[in-house]
Amino acid sequence: KMRSLLLLVLSLLGSGSTMLAQPLTQQWQRQFGDRALSEESLTLLCTRHNRLAVFGSVRDRGYPSAAASWLFNQQGDSLSSRSYFPSAQEYGSVDEAVEAANGDLLLFGMRTRITSGSTFEDEHELICVDSLGTLKWRRNYNTRAFDSNAIHALPDGGAILVGSTNHPLGTTFVPISVATVWRVDAQGNVLWQRTYGQPYDRMYRVAPLTDGSYLLAGVASGGPPSFIGSTWLLRITLDGDTIRSRRYQPSITISDISPAPGGGVVLAGYQQVHYVDSLGRLQWRYTLASQRNGQYSTVNLARALASSQPNNLQVLLGGKRPMPRPTPSTFAPEGYLGVIQGQTSTVTTVWEQMFEGKVE
């Protein structure tokens, strides 16, 4: 199954509040991937070498799946295509990737080992490739993995990894998540590993703050029997010590996190965007409504614009917004980009535009 990579550049070159005052202009569109690609977890990076790096998961050669990378130049010409298949009776995936301090690329995901019959073991995996996608090393962490969600590169060449492990009360077939964070060095060796919260809690994203601390965003599920969850913000030091923990309603499964001017943060998940102030208080929320009955919108990207102010915040959104089809047999664009502006409890649309496919 082929996937389409779409590069968008600013149609208005400038600075400050005018940079995203109008929609973007499509420069080129490329098809890539000669194997079956996963529909989830495609990651796009603009590297220091002026290359575009795309990471995802593929299926090939009888394996269920494996991590993969595609590199392009700024004109959209293909530079390399690599897959990182583990050994027999194993399969893997990549959930997020970052550029390390030395220019290498770090891929964080999962590796599953089939031990016998239908028995399997899940591990977290960190893969390091060079700037052209050549494999340098891979590390596995035997931690009864539940999921892998985010990675943030550190100036020393290491990284912070965010995911969930299977709680001691959980089993292979009935797992119980517990939010887990690791700090690793430049070779992928674990410096520390910590769990946070309660059973059934999960962490999805991490972002650095200006004071040198890190903000983690996830969901506190509330546990059985009700599982009435809340959005969870956890601020930690580089050593993993908790500075502050805040929870608020409603609960969203977070797909993106962006620090905002004034110490607040913008969160995105499903159809919603939340703005939370520096004290962890929800200030406003926005819902991206679908325009087609029976179909749901998703917000995959939400970035606070640096030129904004806390009481007049502009946020760039990207995702999927199904639109009505002229006739049942025709295709309707679903990819969405737009800018919203939040003022206290009022959120307005600055501009929006639609594309074929969806914005990851």
Image: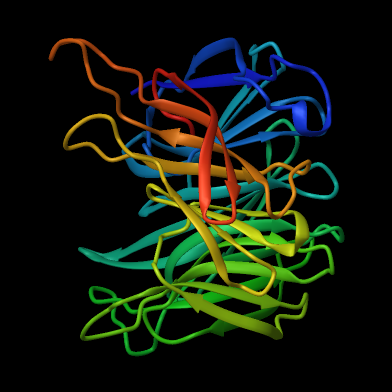
Residue at 58% in and 47% down: 342
Quarter the N terminus occupies: top left
Tell which of 341 and 67 is nearer to you.
341
* Above or below: residue 176 compared with residue 344: below
* Above or below: residue 328 compared with residue 348: above
Residue at 42% in and 20% down: 34
Tell which of 187 and 164 is nearer to you.
164
Q: How many callouts does the rendering have?
A: 0
Tell which of 182 and 306 is nearer to you.
306
| Image-quadrant location for residue 326 | top left
Residue at 82% in and 28% down: 49
* Above or below: residue 77 compared with residue 131: above
Q: How is the image coloured?
A: rainbow
Residue 84 visible to the viewer: no
Q: Position of residue 273 (x, y in %)?
A: 49, 51
Q: Position of residue 306 (x, y in %)?
A: 77, 44
Q: Position of residue 88 (x, y in %)?
A: 39, 50
- Judged left or right of residue 187, residue 333 is left
Determine the residue located farthest toward the bottom in the rendered image. 169
Residue 96 visible to the viewer: yes
- Judged left or right of residue 99, residue 29 is left
- Judged left or right of residue 264, residue 229 is left
| Image-quadrant location for residue 103 | top right
Q: Position of residue 147 (x, y in %)?
A: 43, 64
Tell which of 99 and 201 is nearer to you.
201
Residue at 59% in and 56% down: 344
